[in-house]
Amino acid sequence: MKKTIRDIELKGKKAVCRVDFNVPQDKETGAITDDTRIRAAVPTIEYLLRNGAAVILMSHLGRPKDGPDMKYSLAPVAARLEEILGTPVRFISSPVVVDDAVRKAAKELKAGEVLLLENVRFVPEETKNGEAFAKELASLGDLFVNDAFGSAHRAHSSTAGIAAFLPAVSGFLMEKEVRFLGDAVENPERPFVAILGGAKIGDKIPVIENLLNKVDTLIVGGGMAFTFLKAKGYEIGKSLVDDEKIELAKELLAKAREKNVRFLLPVDVVMADEFANDSPSAVYDANAMDPNRMGLDIGPATIRLFRGALQEAKTVVWNGPMGVFEMDNFAKGTNKIAEALAESKAVTIIGGGDSAAAVKKAGLSDKMTHISTGGGASLEFLEGKGLPGVDCLMD
Ligand code: ADP
Ligand code: MG
């Protein structure tokens, strides 16, 4: 078990806290269009303040290319955080993140006060896990709190390197992610069913490889399914496919048989002429697809098959939509699977940005046990990889 902010003395301490304030912004005005991530960090911040700590916050925002770029300043975040917390947030916009003014402000910061640093990615060393920058960040406080699960799969100065110089614990968001994803992979209540879909086939195939050692049933839908259907020798028309992964797909199908894992693929698909919502479409059996059309959703028989497999499940992990859910005419498969999970008594865990968006769009977010905030991080976790931002925390 990793230590959390509950397991460490906070009174009179300065907590250097890595949060995820990487919020979406309006391209023209820079206004924050969704402050969910800021709100999500509040329980950890308030707990630290209530227990007598001073809080120094750091985050990245966007991907500034070559050093400081004011387009990616955390200034708007500071203002919004102040509104949400109802307490002043000191913000110092330094192009090098830590300068004399910041050091002075950190030194003078009192219990119950909040200081926000500038975008850590203004320093090019950050993403290289530069030791000097990690040390600089660490020198501002007495302990490191990591609450940025979404960045935990990257070894950066502010997510992992800093832990070499300070006692390191997790915040509440991080704790929750590690508990749900960790339990799902290590001690799932069975039957354990994983559903994979979406479009990032190359990224997700390694996840399948690991999940085959853990699950009772593996369901593959969405754009991913066609690579497997092609591996089985089916015509897939103009559907999304990763031809370099066909051999691996064959191996995975064989491995599933060997391990007695039930591997479910679509038995029918909705195919359209073009990648467009109003394109004419029809349902085809998976073994009789139209060579001139593309598959954009799972069909009705597949929905029944997948829902049936979910009925007995005690643990379900879902990553990747079942179709092009952004287009209403191809959203049915994704919505029906989301409904099945919402109705299920199983522990339901959603990973992946688009999957989380699909569940939100269906209005079912609060019916799920856990929706992971980290797309890439949750995938790497399910892949069985250690995450630098988690491994660096104290046991
Ligand atoms: P997540 O963000 O949940 O990890 P991905 O990023 O892998 O999921 O994939 C999401 C994308 O996959 C969506 O934009 C969706 O439109 C697309 N997608 C799903 N099914 C298909 C399909 N059959 N053909 C093409 N794209 C698809
Ligand atoms: Mg995505």
Image (spheres, helix red, strand yellow):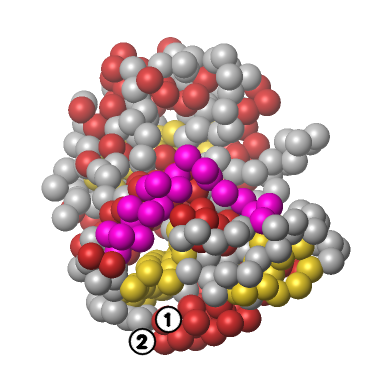
Q: Amino acid at mark 2?
A: Glu
Q: Are marks 1 and 2 in contact (CB under 8 Å)?
A: yes
Numbered mark located on residue 310 in the image: 1
Q: How far apart are labels 1 and 2 at the CA level?
A: 6 Å
User: Looking at the picture, how far across and down is residue 230, in whole percent?
Assistant: 52, 56
What residue is at 76 percent from the left and 36 percent from the top?
Answer: 27
Q: Amino acid at mark 1?
A: Leu
Tell whether circle 2 marks a residue whose Cβ is less than 8 angstroms from ligand 1.
no
Eyeballing the image, is 336 above or below 77?
below
Q: Which portion, as a residue range, is magenta? A: 237-256
Quarter of the image with the N terminus in it: bottom left
User: Looking at the picture, how far across and down is residue 325, in whole percent?
Assistant: 67, 63
Residue 328, quarter of the rendered image: bottom right
What residue is at 23 percent from the left and 56 percent from the top?
Answer: 6
Magenta stretch containing residue 243, yes or no?
A: yes
What residue is at 26 percent from the left and 50 percent from the top?
Answer: 384
What residue is at 28 percent from the left and 67 percent from the top?
Answer: 257
